[in-house]
Amino acid sequence: MLTIRSCFAVLGLLVAGHADPGLPLTGRPSVEIVARGLDNPRGLTFGGRGELYVAEAGRGGTACHPGADGGTLCSGPSGAITVVEFGRQWRIRSGLPSEASPAGTGAAGPSDVTIGPDGEPLHTATSGPSGLHRDGALLAALASPVAIAGTAVPSPVADTAIVDAGKRRLVRLGPRGRVRTIASFEAPAAPSSVTVGPDGAWFVGERFDPSVVRPPAARIWRVAPGHPPAVWATGFTGVVDLAWGPDARLYVLEENALTSIDAQGSRRLIATRGLTSPGGLAIRGGYAYITTCSTCRDTGAVLRLRL
């Protein structure tokens, strides 16, 4: 999932390079850092071998210009897709468009990543140009694509769902690359994340812009093909990302908490505090993988929490 700088940036700082045994996490689950030194890390996903892919929005660049809010934005080819495997990390895609503050924080760029049925990564980007990308090619132009989820069908991009936060909609990319809106959402909330449920439906989380005074509880929507969105769960401060676990529970990442919820609505709090500006969530085995410091230059990281 992904945090948009212009809509949902939350400043924070993680001192990378040390797994802090005193990290204040409820239940004190085992925590370690599996990747560090990332630039504005956002969504993440696992590949077929168990390798972890991370979207880095980058740090901008040297081409500076006035921003829409009166500040200064700097652009450059600093976005990337990073792979983490066997204790190593490396960028398999680099030089991707990025736009950030002069300090390299709060970047717009690669926002989420998934793996197509052919094993190749697809990523969304919120700058230069915004849309869905595969191997350097723009597959679909979108306003503010912040999250992506795909299903294992015999096509590199078929049946891929993308959250277009700027237009408050969930779109579906078909086998021929045709974009179709499958759900729309009303202000002041905007969709922020999407995952595929065990029943084949899409589950969509929402967040509120910081300018919204006393926002209502954020919700998780269930979107089944051919049916309007239905509220599946509510009572959240703002959903950053969603992921289903092998225990048939939906794991919900918020700005300051990680919880899980089952189909009957029973919730379990896993972690609070210690999650500094989280940007994405993936589940594998008995662990949650979370990008932190998602609006930071150099100090972004991926945490692994035992569930």
Image (cartoon, rainbow, N blue to C red):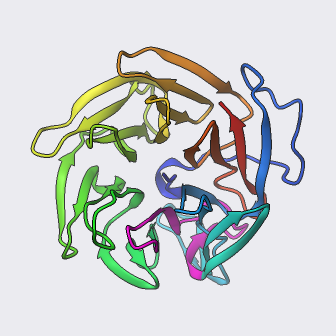
Magenta segment, which residues?
Answer: 95-120
Image quadrant in which the C terminus is located: top right
Measuring from the top left, give residue 60's x and y in whole percent: 63, 74
Q: Residue at x 78, y 32 (%)?
A: 30
Left or right: where 26 falls relative to 245: right
Magenta stretch: includes residue 244:
no
Q: Is residue 237 above or below residue 204?
A: above
Q: Is residue 146 above or below residue 257?
A: below
Measuring from the top left, give residue 69's x and y in whole percent: 50, 60
Q: Residue at x 24, y 42 (%)?
A: 185
Magenta stretch: includes residue 110:
yes
Q: Nearer the viewer, residue 94 or 11?
A: 94
Left or right: where 99 falls relative to 174: right
Left or right: where 99 falls relative to 38: left
Number of on-image labels: 0
Q: Quadrant of residue 288?
A: top right
Q: Is residue 224 above or below residue 129?
A: above
Measuring from the top left, give residue 48's x and y in whole percent: 52, 62
Q: Residue furthest front?
A: 49
Measuring from the top left, give residue 81's x and y in whole percent: 59, 71
